[in-house]
Image (cartoon, rainbow, N blue to C red):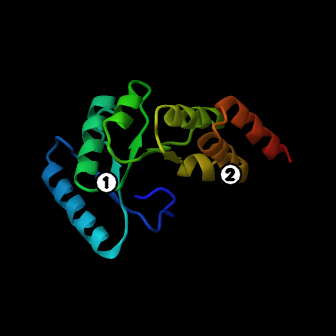
Amino acid sequence: MAMGTPATGNLLHPFTVRGAGGEHETQSMKNLTDLVDDGLKYGVPVMGVVAVGKELVRDARYFRLATRMGAELGAQIIKVYYTEEEFETVVSSCPVPIVVAGGKKLPELEALTMAERSIASGAAGVDMGRNIFQSSHPIAMIQAVRAVVHEGMSAKDAFALFSDLSAS
């Protein structure tokens, strides 16, 4: 995906890479390559979404493999969960941009800290649905997340921004 290319959830066709190394790996990879072919045909970027089932652990080793597989099969961007340990190795092993999934609803400071650490580790962005729309002040929260991702603001300062915006 070229720098500066507009992309939204409507332009990206998400595909979940489930079962890398599991019983559904073959079908998952075929589904992804079919979507990539269609995406190339119609000019629609494909986002590979690395998900783990209940049987798989969220660790950097698995995410390094799964994100790289998604990219090598043609996904132009990959969405993956953040890991506290070795996340920078997940990002550095993937040849396409990575965005971090927000996951379950977290307290605002924790969500902003995850965003800060994700960006510091090399992620291109974050995708924080629940952490925005389930916030007590979603507009303030999205502005705080934007400040972390696009302006390099620390989580602590972004939380202060969130608090100030929430009070007004």
- Count residues near mark 2 (Cα–Cα under 10 Å), then give few for <14, some for 14-19, many for 20+: some
Q: Is residue 12 above or below residue 66?
A: below
Tell me the residue at 24%/38% (across/down). 65
The image quarter in which residue 149 lies = top right
Q: Position of residue 84 (x, y in %)?
A: 44, 26
Q: Position of residue 143 (x, y in %)?
A: 69, 48
Work out which residue is located at the far right of the displayed protein and give it: 168
User: Are the residues flagged by discs 2 and 1 in contact, CB closer than 8 Å?
Assistant: no
Q: Going by the image, does 21 lie left or right of 135?
A: left
Work out which residue is located at the far bottom of the displayed protein and give it: 42
Three-letter amino acid code of the residue under disc 2:
Pro
Q: Which residue is mark 1?
A: 16
Tell me the residue at 13%/52% (across/down). 26
Please tell me whether mark 2 sits on a helix, a strand or a loop. Answer: helix
The disc label shown at residue 138, or none: 2
68 and 61: which is toward the camera: 68
* Distance in Å between CA atoms under marks 2 and 1: 27 Å
